Amino acid sequence: VSLICRYSPDQGWYEFTIENTGKYALFYGQVETDGTTLIYSKLLDGAYSKFKTGKDTNQLGLSCSGRTLTLFINGNQVKQFDDNQYVLKKGKIGISASSANVPPAIIGFDWVKVSQPNQ
């Protein structure tokens, strides 16, 4: 599952991904000048041992406030990252789900909340 913030086709975006094992990563993504190739730069990664697997439900969050990106899993702040390289200031948000190795995957979103972070 991926959470995306500050998406801009010209400037790039931040993308938080988490696997069904609890492994997570935060990326800066961008579209190459050819317009079709995606390039990802890993900003951080790790694993969350309390991630619920199988049919259990997890709540995922990504706060993008100023230069600070904060990852949340099940209400817990997992990691905070201050971006001083790409410094994206605005853009769209998004969510996605995929399965690279074990199709079909059944993934559902019960709700999505978008709000303005406290500055």
Image: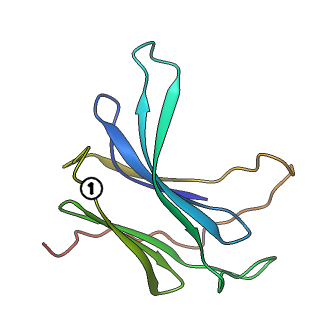
Q: Residues within 10 Å of mark 1 (few under 14, many from 20)?
A: some
Query: Residue 56: horizontal and vertical position, in percent?
Result: 74, 82
Number of marks in the image? 1
Q: Is residue 109 left or right of residue 81?
A: right
The answer to which quarter of the image holds residue 79 is bottom left
Query: Residue 69: horizontal and vertical position, in percent?
Result: 32, 65
Who is closer to the viewer here, 96 or 16?
Answer: 16
Query: Residue 33: horizontal and vertical position, in percent?
Result: 39, 15
86 above or below 38? below
Who is closer to the viewer here, 103 or 115?
Answer: 103
Residue lying farthest left? 119
Residue at numbered disc 1:
83
Q: Secondary structure at mark 1?
A: loop
Who is closer to the viewer here, 40 or 103?
Answer: 40
Q: Is residue 75 left or right of residue 115?
A: right
The answer to which quarter of the image holds residue 10 is top left
Q: In which quadrant is the C terminus drawn?
A: bottom left
Q: Inspect the image, locate mark 1, and give the three-letter code of the amino acid beneath it.
A: Asp
45 above or below 10? below
